[in-house]
Each structure stands twice: as structure tokens, then as C-alpha cells.
Amino acid sequence: MSNHREFRFTSKDRLQIACSHWPFLSASAPLADPAALSGIRPDLPIYLFSGSEDPVGRQLQDVRTLVDRYRKAGVRNISHDFYEGGRHEMLNELNRGQVRTNLLVWLSAVVRDQSHHSEAVWAR
């Protein structure tokens, strides 16, 4: 079983902490590269969510920087939810029901918008 202190950043839920592993963030270099970000489709729906106490996102500082980088790269469809007091593993956090509901609401809206768009294209 994992050392609880080592993984406290992941969640306030002790059961989830016991099952945690430190993730390797291999995507961080491309997220800092304006050329790589400029290759993202401008209308691609992006949803970010994070806890305000997540040290990986530096208590939202890096997450807000990422949102800004996406916007500077021309991405127009960015949504986000930030959870006060939440840590790294928001899908396993004590308020995971709210987090999952918000994610599903966002996904439903994206699917609905995409289906309306495809209906308009096919109606021609």
C-alpha cells in the first residue's frame, strides 16, 4: 500500500490516496510550445478541470496559464471548472459526483452541438 503522505496531493479521500500512483506528465513540453499549440483545431472543444490545491497544476496557476496559451494559439472553445479545495485526482475527490456531473454536462453539450452541426451540413 502507498505511503499516504506521499500521495496526499491527489485527494482528500483516504481510500483513493491508498490506490494512487504518481503520474508521469510527458505532455508538459508540447503544452509550452506555441508551434505545437498552433496545430490545434481552433474549434476543438477543450474542457479543463482542476482542484485549487493541486500541486501539479501549481494551485491553478499552471492551469490558467494553459488556458491562456490555448487562447493565444487561437483555440476558441475552451471551458473549465475549478474546484475550491480540490486536489489532483478530482474524479476521485470527495465531491466527485459534482465533478463527474459537470464533465457529463459538458460532454453532452459538445455532442449535442456536434450533432446539430452535422445535421446542418447534411441538410444541404
Image (tube, helix red, strand yellow):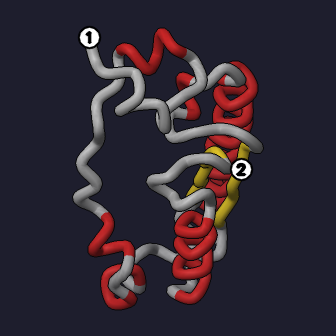
What percent of the width, then of the height, locates residue 16?
A: 46, 16
Q: Where is residue 21, by image quadrant?
A: top left
Determine the secondary structure under disc 2: strand
Residue that appears at 62% across and 42% down:
111
Residue that appears at 27% across and 73% down:
29
Label 1, on which residue? 1
Determine the secondary structure under disc 1: loop
What percent of the width, then of the height, locates residue 50?
A: 61, 48
The residue mark sitting in front, 2 or 1, is 1
Compared to 34, does 103 lie above or below?
Answer: above
15 relative to 85 in the view: left or right: left
Q: Nearer the viewer, residue 64 or 115?
A: 64
Say if mark 2 contacts mark 1, CB within 8 Å: no
Residue that appears at 55% across and 48% down:
54
Compared to 21, does 122 lie above or below?
Answer: below
What percent of the width, then of the height, locates residue 45?
A: 58, 59
Residue that appears at 65% across and 65% down:
78
Q: Nearer the viewer, residue 78 or 113?
A: 78
56 relative to 97 in the view: left or right: left
Label 2, on which residue? 82
Q: Residues within 10 Å of mark 1 (few under 14, many from 20)?
A: few
Q: Residues within 10 Å of mark 2 (few under 14, many from 20)?
A: some
Q: Nearer the viewer, residue 17 or 39?
A: 17
Q: Where is residue 91, by image quadrant?
A: top right
Q: Where is residue 3, by image quadrant?
A: top left
The mark nearer the N terminus, 2 or 1, is: 1
Q: How far apart are the alpha carbons under marks 2 and 1?
A: 30 Å
> Could you tell me if residue 33 is visible in this image?
yes
Q: Amino acid at mark 2?
A: Phe
What percent of the width, then of the height, locates residue 86?
A: 66, 38
